[in-house]
Image (cartoon, coloured by chain):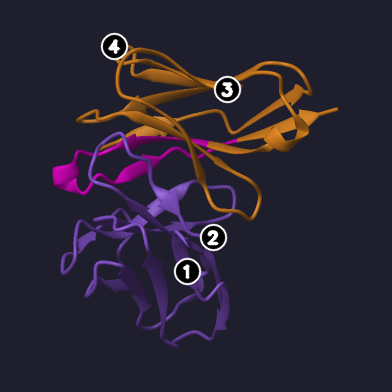
Amino acid sequence: GQSLEQPSEVTAVEGAIVQINCTYQTSGFYGLSWYQQHDGGAPTFLSYNALDGLEETGRFSSFLSRSDSYGYLLLQELQMKDSASYFCAVRAPYNQGGKLIFGQGTELSVKP
Amino acid sequence: NAGVTQTPKFRVLKTGQSMTLLCAQDMNHEYMYWYRQDPGMGLRLIHYSVGEGTTAKGEVPDGYNVSRLKKQNFLLGLESAAPSQTSVYFCATAGGHSNQPQHFGDGTRLSIL
């Protein structure tokens, strides 16, 4: 089976940097994704890591270490609008439908 | 350029009633998914489809049925609604490569009384 663990909530101040960790257990690994969800809204894709290392997209970066079954999402220059839930997800292979298995989500609160 | 459209956006049902949720996509994606999300929890996969005419069970399929008669539409049915099915339902689609993200609809908020 597959399971993911991430902290339930994180609080940070505007302008700061915050890291949201994710550890996973999976029988087959085909990439770690991160999604953002504002309260009441649809999840939106942020980043995807298939190989070890750091992927950078603007203020957001995502890191993966396959040997440690670990990844993180790094948010820099935090803004109030970054207050949301962040989900890590592992993807099944496409012969299993490419389905995503999500973590429980980390609620990020950005304070002034 | 609608992307993924879910119908309806809200619905209140009585226990035992049936209904169908519609997901329509205009991105020509092969893969479609139905998730449910309960308060303070992540998304759990109900059923999914890897192409027209195919469906498969996800993590929590009991009490739901699906159909994918046309590539662009994925229907989720509740035959006899139960209060435990009160949730927010999200449809998502994805293209055929592993690095392509899933695109989500805005959700259907369903309450079963």
Q: How far is the residue under mark 2 from the one under mark 4?
A: 36 Å
Question: The magenta stretch spans which residues?
Answer: A87-106
Residues flagged by tags 4 and 1 on a common chain = no
Q: Residue B76: x and y, percent? A: 35, 72
Closest to the camera, between mark 4 and mark 1, is: 1
Residue of label 4: A67
- Residue A102 occupies which quadrant of the picture? top left
Say what amino acid the circle numbered 1 marks.
Answer: Gln
The residue wearing badge 1 is B6
**Amino acid type at mark 2:** Asp
Instruction: Please give the chain letter of the residue carrying mark 3.
Output: A
The residue that appears at 42% across and 50% down in the rendered structure is B103
Q: For the point 56% across and 28% down, which residue is it?
A: A7
**Secondary structure beneath label 3:** loop
Callout 4 environment at 10 Å: few (<14), some (14 to 19), or many (20+)?
few
Confirm whether circles 3 and 2 share one chain. no
* Spot occupied by residue A28 in the image (x, y as percentages of width and height): 20, 30
Callouts 2 and 4 in the same chain = no
Q: Which residue is mark 3?
A: A58
Q: Secondary structure at mark 1?
A: strand
**Do pointers 2 and 1 mark residues of a single chain?**
yes
Secondary structure under the numbered disc 4 in the rendered image: loop
In primary-sequence order, the first of circles 2 and 1 is 1
Residue B69 in the figure: left or right of residue B59:
left
**Mark 3 touching mark 4, by CB under 8 A?**
no
- Badge nearest the viewer, 2 or 4: 2
Q: Are marks 2 and 4 in contact (CB under 8 Å)?
A: no
Chain letter matching colour purple: B
